[in-house]
Every structure is written in C-alpha cells, then in structure tokens.
Image (cartoon, rainbow, N blue to C red):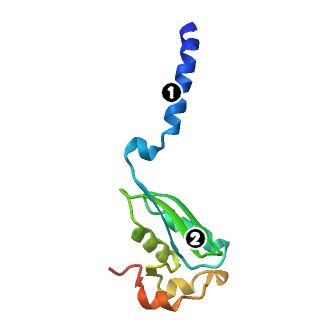
Amino acid sequence: MKNVIKSLPVILLLLFIFGLTSPADAHGRNTEEVEFAVLGNCGMCKDRIERAAYTVRGVRSADWNQQTQKLTLVFRTDRTDQETVERAIAKAGHDTENFITDEETHANLHHCCIYERNPAFLKNNKLYNEE
C-alpha cells in the first residue's frame, strides 16, 4: 500500500502528460479543417446538415452557421475528404459549394427548410450522385 501511495504522483504526472498529447499526434492521424457554403434556413436545417456530415466516417466536427451559410468541418484525411462529406449533405437535401441535391429531395424538405436555391450552384455544380 505504501508503494502505491509513493508512485501515485508519478502516475498522475504521466496521465497528465499523455492527456496533453492529442490523439492525432499520438496515432499519426492527420486532420484537416475546411469551411464551405451549405444552403439552409433554420435550426432544423442545421441539425440535418450536421447529422449528414457526421454520417461520414472520419468526420470529427461539423458546425453549420445559419447566418453565414458556412459549414466548418474537421475530418481525418486518412478516412475521408471534403467531397465525400459534401455529397452526403447534398443527399440529405442541402446544396453545397460543389454538389446539389435533386429537385425531389429539396421539395420534400419541411416547409420552413425549403431554401432559395443559388442559380450559380445549380448551373455549375454536379448532383451528389453523379461522377
């Protein structure tokens, strides 16, 4: 018992040091943070957009800002990429910088979630399920 008490400060110090090391550093996992446009209107849109992002393996953080219409995304680069996340969000019903949702999915959103579509997005971007 006396030995355990003597080694307790050393154990606590080691736990503190290892706790400061991020999992990304400890395991060699690289993360990337990006921000891109995602169209939406309300809190339900925020929930849907963020949930769609989290369905992609490797996403660590997703935060959509209703005022700026931007999603801040942190993901593991060895598991996914921005394109995969944008496709998942477009599949859920929200146009992004590079991918758009289909008309039926957009029309089936809750009435408060039907956002005004950006003509530039419609003209220049691919459907989420196109190669």
- Looking at the image, is mark 1 or mark 2 nearer the viewer? 1
Mark earlier in primary sequence (1, 2) = 1
Q: Position of residue 36 (x, y in %)?
A: 50, 73
Cα separation, mark 1 vs mark 2, equals 41 Å
| Residue pictured at 53% horizontal, 88% vertical | 118
Q: Which residue is mark 2?
A: 48
Which label number is shown at residue 96? none
Q: Position of residue 38 (x, y in %)?
A: 54, 76
The answer to whether mark 1 and mark 2 are in CB contact below 8 A is no
| Residue pictured at 48% horizontal, 43% vertical | 22
Quadrant in which the N terminus is drawn = top right
Q: Position of residue 55 (x, y in %)?
A: 48, 63
Residue 49: quadrant of the picture: bottom right
Kind of residue sitting beneath label 2? Arg
Q: Position of residue 21 (x, y in %)?
A: 48, 39
Q: Which residue is mark 1?
A: 14
| Residue pictured at 58% horizontal, 13% vertical | 5
Which residue is most to the left? 131
| Residue pictured at 38% horizontal, 79% vertical | 129
Under circle 1, the secondary element is helix
Kind of residue sitting beneath label 1? Leu
Which residue is most to the top? 2
